[in-house]
Amino acid sequence: MIQPTRIRSLNQAPVNGAARYVLYWMGLSQRAIFNPALEHAVDEANARGLPVLVCYGIAEGFPEVNARHWTFLLEGLAEVRPELERRGIAFVTRRAPPVETALLYAADAALVVCDRNYLKPVRAFYADFAARAPCRVVQVEGDVVVPVETASPKHEIAARTLRPKVYRLLADYLVGLDERTVAHRATDLRFENTLDLSDVPRLVASLNTDQGVRPVRRFTGGTAQAEARLKHYLGAPFAHYASVRGRPEAGAASHMSPYLHFGQVSPIAIALAVQASTTGDADDRAAYIEELVVRRELAMNHIFYEPRYDDLAAVPDWARKTLDAHRADQRPFLYEPEQFEQGLTHDIYWNAAMTEMRETGYMHNHMRMYWGKKIVEWSASPEAAWETALRLNNRYFIDGRDANSFTNVGWLFGLHDRPWGPRPVYGNVRSMGAPSLKKFDADGYVREVERLAAVERGESP
Ligand SMILES: Cc1cc2nc3c(=O)[nH]c(=O)nc-3n(C[C@H](O)[C@H](O)[C@H](O)COP(=O)(O)OP(=O)(O)OC[C@H]3O[C@@H](n4cnc5c(N)ncnc54)[C@H](O)[C@@H]3O)c2cc1C
């Protein structure tokens, strides 16, 4: 089922009555399975006696995207084509900017269906496109469980204020999505693909992008990978999620965030699988839904309602004031951004976290908190800390540049939190110190990161 609240028109242009197809301009939802925008395009096409064309144009040169991100994205995209072809849907991929690509194919479309994305540059893409498109543009929200404005009409101050609103709506939104039968197969639609997905490493090497951040062996992109990981995860590691999810070495994290970030898996599909799982108990299921739905969608709420989400100005007044009041406090250690980036601090646990991020593109949530809080403590100013944390986060994590990136970096500085007892440097912003490393096997974590980094270097199987 596609709830009406997921669908909205972005312009008032008429539906083109002399069209060749319904166009789905794929953006965030980079998958052929459990994709409401795709299924909506099929509904529209079936009703008009038309086939469906899906197009994708790459935003080469998009800020902060590098070879690691492109590899993961393009691996996923390569999987989409056979899935669409199996259903009789045409797919054209272009090495051209997304808006230009969509405009090219919109000329012969009855209407265009597109995805939703709350990041500022992507919102600008859609506004630009809707103003220039020759036909109706319809946007479908497929990457959150409850659409942001439906969950709440305002900026929420914390998980506790969003949680009851989301829970009230959960039963209506955590429902399956039927794959439609395509009534009119796209057998006569032939277009030139200028983005050749047959050799992803070669394609990535040819892109105008930061080649300095290497692809990783730890993660391969694509819906099939996401599904296989989820199946394995729910088969055993998920058990005890509620009690051990804070322990990086416990293996209780699902590693779904890279796949969610690139829309290669639906959060609803994950949530339904978790709810149906018998591996964990009710506490485990509730704890996972809390992270996947409440926390993740709190981040969406934040970047939708707070236009300054990529700036320190987005954290609450009390937090900015207290950080400012402690600006002159002596730092116990002081590092330059390059020292952070290379993992050259005095702290072997922090350095291991940085290595995990830099070499493998991922870090467990508990270490992300420790990593970020220490950047706040060991940087020359709150502004320098913000800049370092956000830049490293978005450069190295495969799931970087996400609503979760901006919101969780904001959390380091007091966003969605409350004042705590005062500490040097942090003031009343929550601090994190050595005791947080005593809650798990931190030395085991360091050893595991060494192993993972060796695998990335090709030194061990
Ligand atoms: C400083 C800092 C930076 C972060 N940067 C990012 C980022 O760039 N991209 C990103 O996706 N997440 C980020 N997070 C949130 C969180 O750490 C990751 O989503 C999580 O570790 C991903 O691993 P997983 O999928 O194995 O998590 P699991 O524990 O298996 O959780 C399942 C899903 O729930 C969601 N989730 C889990 N924890 C959080 C959280 N704290 N906030 C919001 N959603 C959550 C994610 O979608 C995750 O995939 C950051 C957290 C901190 C403290």
Image: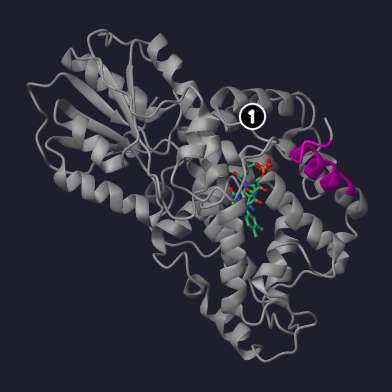
Tell whether 65 sits left or right of 358: left
* Residue 349 in the image: above or below residue 136: below
Residue tagged 1: 275
Q: Is residue 190 visible?
A: yes
Q: Residue at x 80, y 82 (%)?
A: 332
Give the camera-side residue of 92 and 162. Answer: 92
Confirm whether residue 416 shows in the render.
Answer: no
Residue located at (73% from left, 24% from top): 232
Quarter of image, res 274: top right
Query: Residues in magenta?
Result: 447-459
206 left or right of 126 in image: right
Report the coloring of the rendering: one colour
Residue nearest the observer in this picture, 70 or 386:
70
Image coords of residue 63 (percent x, y): 44, 55
SS at mark 1?
helix
Residue type marked 1: Gln
Q: Is residue 169 above or below residue 52?
A: below
Residue 461 in percent (x, y) is at: 82, 30
Q: Quadrant of the N terminus?
A: top left
Q: Position of residue 197 (x, y in %)?
A: 45, 25
